[in-house]
């Protein structure tokens, strides 16, 4: 189980406010890294997303813990990082929130389950799973069948 993760954004407070609305939670300032916010889903697992100012990098700092180092690059770019999060918010409301922010939002099929691709600030991918999408995801990812399912999906996509 992943309890929290972090992303960088040009406008951390705005992104935190919008993501809190999407996940049905709240956002608060994140004092260890000034200018950052913590989006809390307020669920029993402590699910959260830390939003740092763009350009922030994390460096080891011995026993006292991570050092948050501000960067000169204030524009986040595309990358391989993304995450999926289950939410209680219905798909239509999630899409409306994304549209209000002018963030790209697409309903996509991912090997047997649907996701809403939300492109935070049109740069960072998060996959949002409203209740019906979460049910599909959990059905596909059951420990007793996920490896065989994904192998079957891969075989269907191979040429010949």
Image (tube, rainbow, N blue to C red):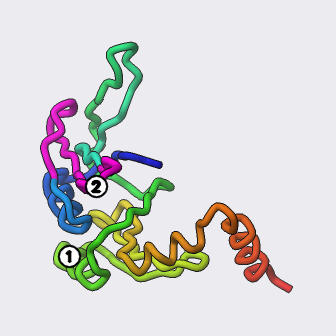
Residue 32, horizontal then vertical, whole percent? 21, 30
Q: Nearer the viewer, residue 142 or 137?
A: 142
Pointer 1: residues within 10 angstroms few (<14), some, or many (20+)?
Answer: some
Q: Earlier in the sequence, mark 2 or mark 1?
A: 2
From the viewer's side, name the closer residue of 4 and 101. Answer: 4
Q: Residue at x 38, y 13 (%)?
A: 63
Q: What is the x, y in percent for residue 30?
A: 18, 38
Quadrant where the C terminus is found in the figure:
bottom right
Mark 2 in CB contact with mark 1 (< 8 angstroms): no
Q: Which residue is mark 2?
A: 43
* Mark sitting on residue 136: none
Q: Which residue is mark 1?
A: 97
Residue 7 visible at all: no
Label 2 crowd (10 A; few <14 / some 14-19 / many >=20): few
Q: Nearer the viewer, residue 94 or 130?
A: 130
Give the magenta range: 27-48
Residue 109 at what x, y percent from top left?
52, 81
Give the structural element (helix, strand or loop) at label 1: helix
Helix, strand or loop for the magenta stretch, by majority: loop
Element under disc 2: loop
């Amino acid at each position: 189980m992943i309890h929290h993760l972090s992303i960088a954004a040009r406008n951390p407070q705005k992104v935190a406010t919008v993501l809190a609305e999407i996940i049905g939670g709240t956002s608060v300032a994140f004092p260890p890294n000034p200018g950052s916010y913590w989006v809390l889903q307020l669920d029993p697992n402590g699910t959260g997303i830390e939003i740092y100012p763009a350009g922030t990098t994390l460096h080891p700092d011995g026993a006292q813990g991570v050092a948050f180092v501000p960067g000169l690059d204030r524009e986040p770019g595309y990358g391989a990082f993304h995450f999926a999060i289950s939410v209680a918010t219905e798909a239509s409301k999630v899409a409306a929130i994304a549209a209000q922010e002018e963030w790209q939002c697409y309903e996509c099929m991912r090997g047997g389950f649907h996701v809403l691709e939300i492109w935070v600030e049109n740069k960072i991918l998060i996959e949002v799973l409203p209740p019906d999408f979460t049910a599909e995801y959990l059905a596909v990812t059951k420990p007793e069948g996920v490896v065989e399912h994904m192998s079957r999906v891969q075989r269907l996509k191979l040429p010949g």
